[in-house]
Amino acid sequence: MEFRPYHRFENNFKLERLVNKLRKSGHIPDGVCENFFRYHQGMTQKLHAAKYNIDRLNGKLTNPEMMEAADTTGDFMFETNMFVDGFFYNSGSSLDILARIVLTLFGIALPNRVYFETAFNKLTSVRPGDPILPKLRHPVWRPLFLDYRNTQTHEVILLSRIHIDIENFGNEQIRKIVFPLPDNPRVLPRIRTFEQNPDVIKYITQQFTRILSIANTVYGDIYSRGRISGAFPI
């Protein structure tokens, strides 16, 4: 599965084919197979939804016809924040579903609540030193990502300041609407600062690429080990 121009997720196909092959040969229990596919489909749905929101937001902010509307209508602010909200919700959920996939294919019972760090904690307790653990470690960029996600979901909107960016390329002039993300999204909008992430499109594109890279790397690790062992759970 590809998410151009962001990142390829080619290990998706490899793991799907392997699970189907092992199902036909009887080397994966029906319950494990069933849970893999329902979580796997859920995760890829979330990833596609996150990409959809990025693409829609990018198109909206680079559409010349929207330049005037950006200053005159509340609908514009509503839709841009809606796309950002959709990105954070779906991309964050995809990582939590990835944790379910990992625990399922490792044969570890799922607790009632599973988040991305759950896979790391569970595997650390039962299989310390497993080579997949570094791939599941909490990335350094995730705390701010979660802060943005949780703030947008539960408290206030993120996009509150706007400006027009103009770039000249020879005889061509490109204008786009730019929304910066607040350095601390939890403070009152009137006292926010906007230094750390000055362009929301650049920020969410980078985070999406990182999430796809994590998913592809984890899938690749599981695929390689399942192929060698010839069975799941690993």
Image: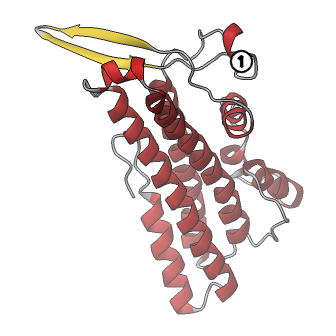
Quadrant that contains the N terminus? bottom left
Q: Residue at the far left: name it.
A: 171
Name which residue type carries label 1. Asn
Which picture quadrant has residue 219? bottom right
Residue 232: image x %, image y %?
Answer: 65, 77
Q: Residue at x 55, y 86 (%)?
A: 23
Q: Residue at x 61, y 46 (%)?
A: 89
Q: Is residue 29 visible?
A: no
Seen in the picture, residue 200 relative to 33 is either above or below; the reply is above
Label 1 neighbour load within 10 Å: few <14, some 14-19, many 20+:
some
- Front residue of 62 and 46: 62
Quadrant that contains the C terminus? bottom right
- Front residue of 29 and 38: 38
Q: Is residue 75 visible?
A: yes
Seen in the picture, residue 88 relative to 33 is either above or below; the reply is above
Marks counted in the figure total 1
* Residue on which disc 1 sits: 184
Q: Residue at x 34, y 40 (%)?
A: 5
Residue 66: image x %, image y %?
Answer: 31, 26
Q: Residue at x 68, y 10 (%)?
A: 190
Which picture quadrant has residue 221? bottom right
Seen in the picture, residue 213 relative to 182 is either above or below; the reply is below
- Front residue of 78 and 84: 78
Q: Secondary structure at mark 1?
A: loop
Left of 146 or right of it: where is 167? left
Residue 200: image x %, image y %?
Answer: 50, 25
Residue 125: image x %, image y %?
Answer: 89, 56
